[in-house]
Image (cartoon, coloured by chain):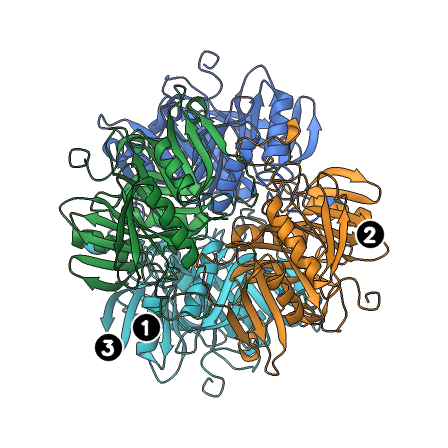
Chain colours: A green, B orange, C cyan, D blue
Amino acid sequence: MTDLAHLGPVEILTPKGEESLRFFVDVMGMEVEAQEGQSYYLRCWGDYQRWSTKLTESSTSGMACLGLRAWDPDALERLVSRVEGTGLGEGWTDGDLGRGPSYRFRDPDGHVFELYYEVERYDPPEHLKPAHKNVPGRYTGRGCAVKRLDHINILAEDVRANREFCVDALGYRLYERIELEDGTESGAWMSASIAAHELIYTADAYGARGRLHHVAFWVDTREECLRAADIWLENDIFIEAAPSKHTIAQGMFLYGYEPGGNRVEVTSGGRLVYAPDEPVVVWTEAERAKGQAWGVKTIEAFHTYGTPPVEESG
Amino acid sequence: MTDLAHLGPVEILTPKGEESLRFFVDVMGMEVEAQEGQSYYLRCWGDYQRWSTKLTESSTSGMACLGLRAWDPDALERLVSRVEGTGLGEGWTDGDLGRGPSYRFRDPDGHVFELYYEVERYDPPEHLKPAHKNVPGRYTGRGCAVKRLDHINILAEDVRANREFCVDALGYRLYERIELEDGTESGAWMSASIAAHELIYTADAYGARGRLHHVAFWVDTREECLRAADIWLENDIFIEAAPSKHTIAQGMFLYGYEPGGNRVEVTSGGRLVYAPDEPVVVWTEAERAKGQAWGVKTIEAFHTYGTPPVEESG
Amino acid sequence: MTDLAHLGPVEILTPKGEESLRFFVDVMGMEVEAQEGQSYYLRCWGDYQRWSTKLTESSTSGMACLGLRAWDPDALERLVSRVEGTGLGEGWTDGDLGRGPSYRFRDPDGHVFELYYEVERYDPPEHLKPAHKNVPGRYTGRGCAVKRLDHINILAEDVRANREFCVDALGYRLYERIELEDGTESGAWMSASIAAHELIYTADAYGARGRLHHVAFWVDTREECLRAADIWLENDIFIEAAPSKHTIAQGMFLYGYEPGGNRVEVTSGGRLVYAPDEPVVVWTEAERAKGQAWGVKTIEAFHTYGTPPVEESG
Amino acid sequence: MTDLAHLGPVEILTPKGEESLRFFVDVMGMEVEAQEGQSYYLRCWGDYQRWSTKLTESSTSGMACLGLRAWDPDALERLVSRVEGTGLGEGWTDGDLGRGPSYRFRDPDGHVFELYYEVERYDPPEHLKPAHKNVPGRYTGRGCAVKRLDHINILAEDVRANREFCVDALGYRLYERIELEDGTESGAWMSASIAAHELIYTADAYGARGRLHHVAFWVDTREECLRAADIWLENDIFIEAAPSKHTIAQGMFLYGYEPGGNRVEVTSGGRLVYAPDEPVVVWTEAERAKGQAWGVKTIEAFHTYGTPPVEESG
């Protein structure tokens, strides 16, 4: 039980606005809900809010801001108060499209977050009305037809410090983490719900700060992860890691880079954590060296590549 | 945010102990964790507790008791206090195998529940140890290889009264319900988590009390629901409703009767409710007449059949 | 071993040219390869010929012509000679778009067929070039993304007579058939390959002649049949039979009517017949009354509905 | 159109009889149809013959004999006559369990084959009778539940010579092949049917003769290949290549070594070749360097490992 309801929306930067837009719309199958300045507000058919992903053309790539929705107004107040206590708060903003007052802060690594409660629920136009009223938007089946923004993995110079901040100030539940032989924490998987992960921190190989590892979008079946790979292949999307199964969290994955350079995942499955007292699973360096669930070795770039490129981050 | 962590374990009665056992073990792919008297304690490979389903040989069928785990000791206290306030409490018991003190009560319809917090976590014997330590038990792949107890649908003379009790005293979130033209509530889908449903009430066509509609077990993909149908077919299990997709909750289903007569579902998918302020979806009689998601008409028995047989309930 | 290579292309008539075109292109995911007069030449991404389905606007619905490709020029000659011997031959035509000389004939029920050998292989334009050169066209993933024309089911007044013609004159292998209690043959499943069926005859409930039961398009997984149902639902396509599994031939199905009224199937799987001496499976009336593989009752319209509407056929 | 009906059964040698037997029965889900001496006759639920795989305990591993069924008695005669003409024939044997007179020969590389026509069709005992009479055996769902022997890949010192023998003397159709920059043929994919491959030759990295690359068993969906990996993982079967998609033939794969050392594949999908004049797809060294369909690099052992171990072959 946490004061957080869930993660998102996220704002992503891209130096290739048009190509990135085409990727998210044509290849991933998202819809443009609105446009403003250099930004497109994009949504998946299963997102209940108006949008889950804001794509902003910029001089570089990476994540600009990550929203976190509080459970209710009281929970928002408690969250803000705890964040203020850490000295990392930056104050209230007017929010964003379809979103009310938001409290901006940075995690210890410098990533920008916004806590909020008020949002507009999605009201589809006629051509995107779904057949069933318990579904937010029409399943068009276009491209990978991703259903919703699922989780974010961000890089940090010091995973442990950020993880502790998230657990202590934000109330995240910690489900799994990696501890290297020298005691360093190199990865932490956290969630505000029974989903195996919503917010992940992994170590930045360059010791850089504020960078993004990947943004993950959900599909309902692992068969759709395979299908997504077929679609990426036909659309010349760089596939960094072909569909396979994660050891940590047990989900199916497909990783690649969108035209702007940001790593994107199509994900499905993963364990659900119903136990309120679930022990944290701690993975050792030796265990991680075994690779992914079916023995696929994790490729080197997965441990080093992030956005923005390291020379530009700071 | 609720004081409940999740539903289960459940105790099911069967007049055909041996045949029912063979169904749950050989066809559904569950393991026998223990035996005591007329009862077998059964578990799925993904259940984190020692068992999720207690199968007890009896003169009749139906559900004997449904466990509900509290989030923590304080939450348990709050829950018990609220239930006591309704006058439906029956007092503390010693719990059951691997389960600590439990507070017994009846819902307005007469079904027996037990609230508890303390449980033993499953510790697999060597031959059932899983390859990955974040998975409770070994995936043997036997039969339908169901992963965990997912949800329970119970029949009630007065759905609304029971639903209100569950929301008010137990803190369940109500996600969807059916309201007939005459104002009667004929079904209510509730959850303590983001899962589309954990506890469902539907109207007992005979106005009987305390009966069971079905017990549902989870598989990770809808492909596995199809595979389960292939397996049921080869094992002469009566298939009441072949695999298809529910309109309500949007999950994939397969329904049949285990040898003891209880309706069992193999389920997968279904929407996840991340919005803390998700509006309740109210279905009309006309909408439900359209059948399931892809137009399959709901068969008549689905609206009438329950256990125990109606002449024996009361 | 037969002189036939495979069935197709097929020409379908529709009284609603534009709506039918939108169905095949937007919903089924086919491409327009060419247009001529009232006809659109459509192809699936896995069709090796330029087109597999010719959609012709007309005053009515139904099948105008079914192509059958011979194994080689000698086989074509043998086929034509055998057909001529039956007196059902009508003579040579110039073929059709991308198809050489074709020999036109009618089956005993009056359906028009054309035997041919020469065809143009599909040469995709740049935007439809596939990533792998052993695949005919790009997998765009649009709509149901059907892969190829799979099989045709045609109605006949006298199934046995037509089946005997197909086996004797065309060299089809008969894999399964239905024989009613009175000795009538009410269905026959034939193939020129190891595929479970390519050409099917079933009894016309009205005793009409020359009508079409359905045209079936292939997808590679049964998961894609489920996905096709999701897409049809969202596009208001009438679903006659939701996805389930056939007893005969063991394939997965989804049936509905395209806007012009013709029944269309999305199909996958089905047994492969490797045995050269596979015995014909004969189904009795009682066996067929059990419904489809998982017990789904075959709906009445499936036994009666065909195109064109019965008053217009003749 | 070929004189061959299909490939199989195959006889495999193993130095670890009991462990290999447990692998094929418990993990792969095959049934023991008979035992004789050091051999177990194993079958998949979808094999129409009594058995498809003979497992013989021996001092080493590898393939002992590969059966090839002729289309009919005349075709068998033609095949034998052509093989005799090559000087590679060894004469008639009494066949094997449930198989009539067989003509033994060696391919140019020295692998033993037997051509035959007469076989016993499988007649299941009561507990293995399937629900539908057009299915050979009961789908028990045990382990990977492989459906039938699908294809064999054998290593050869000189791929081209063996491929030419297979095409010329046996009448195989050649669908795809790899030609290195120096003109060497390093792989050839052949079939007697529309299936993408039945018999494959790839180059033996050691220039050894008579060795086996892998034996492949079919499952109907690519989802089942993923499931097979889950099952292999839990049973400590060495996974050489986790599930992914082949570029050549476009099938889904999972590769590993059974306890006796032989490489085994669980396969599904792959293109069907309906065109009688399908051009042979020739892959270049550069194209193959791109790895498998979704970019997974082919691991080195895949190009070198075979059975028996190279020091023992010859």
Q: Quadrant of residue B60?
A: bottom right
Task: Name the outermost residue toward the top.
Answer: D311
The image position of residue A51, as x and y in percent, is: 31, 60
Q: Position of residue C306 (x, y in %)?
A: 49, 77
The image quadrant of residue A21 is bottom left
Kind of residue indicated by mark 3: Gly
Which residue, given by chain and number where applicable, does mark 2 sit on? B16
- Marks 3 and 1 sit apart, C-alpha to C-alpha, by 36 Å
The amino acid on which the numbered mark 2 sits, given as a three-letter code, is: Lys
Q: Residue furthest right?
A: B59
Q: To which chain does the residue with label 3 belong?
A: C
**Residue C110 at least partly seen:** yes
List the single residue furthest toward the left: A59
The crowding category of the residue bearing disc 2, from other C-alpha atoms within 10 Å (few below 14, some 14 to 19, many at least 20), is some
Instruction: Give yes or no for contact between labels 3 and 1 (Cβ–Cβ under 8 Å).
Output: no
Left or right for C80, reference D52: left
SS at mark 2? loop
Q: Nearer the viewer, residue D131 or A223?
A: A223
Tell me the residue that label 1 is attached to: A125
Q: Nearer the viewer, residue C148 or D77?
A: C148
Q: Measure how far apart labels 2 and 1 are at the Cα level.
A: 55 Å
Would you name the residue on which mark 3 appears? C37
Q: Is there any visible trace of residue D82 in the rendered image?
A: no
Tell me the crowding category of disc 3: few under 14, some 14 to 19, or many 20 or more residues within 10 angstroms, Cα based.
Answer: few
SS under mark 1: loop
Of helix, strand and loop, which one carries label 3? loop
